[in-house]
Amino acid sequence: MPLFRGCDRVVVDNILGSSCSRFSSYSKGDFIAMQDSACRSLFILCEGSVYARMTNDEGREFTLDTLSAPDVLASAFIFSTDGTFPVTIIANSDCKMWVVSKECIRTLIEHDTVALNNFLTILSDHSIFLSSRLHQFALQTLSSRLIGYLEKNGSIRNLQETAFILGVARPSLSRSVSQLVRQGVVRKTEEGYVLA
């Protein structure tokens, strides 16, 4: 797992073997953490995948990211002043999570500099990802976001699901896809819409 790569196994076992952590299992569709709820633990995704969703006051929803094991959730929130989840985390498949308390993580990074460096790398990578998502939504057109999505994911099989992920209404996405098909940038195949 990225957080423990290269760490002193004895130190990690001694610290994480205490009562400050637990394993949890979730079924597809289960809510793991709710937006604006307290964030007191680091969630280490051991199996499966989850997605992070934001909802505004008007009820508009936006999928920020999909994460797969092994990955760390809540790294950017656990030591924040606010101490809450800015997103709702939902199981995208059956998954297993190792939930480690804030105090336990603090002790680990104080005693193992490799764990500290790993944690800082994870934080930095998540910050870069969030900056790129902000750029994508604030500065790019829907067509360029759609092309970026296709470059990353290969195809669009379900317009409704893709609209949800991109945070747009399905009719807007359909118009944009149709326009890109007419321009010859995108073509429809048996696998869905792909880049031409």
Image (spheres, rainbow, N blue to C red):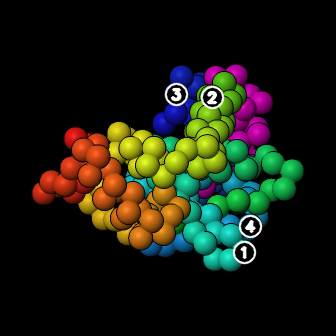
Q: Is residue 86 left or right of residue 48?
A: right
Secondary structure state at the residue bearing disc 1? loop
Q: CA distance from mark 3 to mark 4?
A: 31 Å
Viewer-nearest of labels 2 and 1?
Answer: 1
Q: Is residue 66 above or below residue 94?
A: above
The one nearer the camera, 63 or 29, is 63
Residue at the (74%, 67%) spot, across then down = 36
Viewer-nearest of labels 2 and 3?
Answer: 2
Q: Which residue is mark 2?
A: 121
Residue at the (32%, 50%) spot, across then down = 180
Q: Is residue 84 left or right of residue 60?
A: right
Which label sits on residue 36?
Answer: 4
Viewer-nearest of labels 3 and 4?
Answer: 4
Secondary structure state at the residue bearing disc 3? loop
Please rate how many residues cluster around mark 2, counting C-alpha atoms within 10 Å: few if below 14, some from 14 to 19, many from 20: some
Whichever of callouts 3 and 4 sits on the residue coming sooner in the sequence is: 3
| Residue 165 among magenta residues | no
Please rate how many residues cluster around mark 1, counting C-alpha atoms within 10 Å: few if below 14, some from 14 to 19, many from 20: few
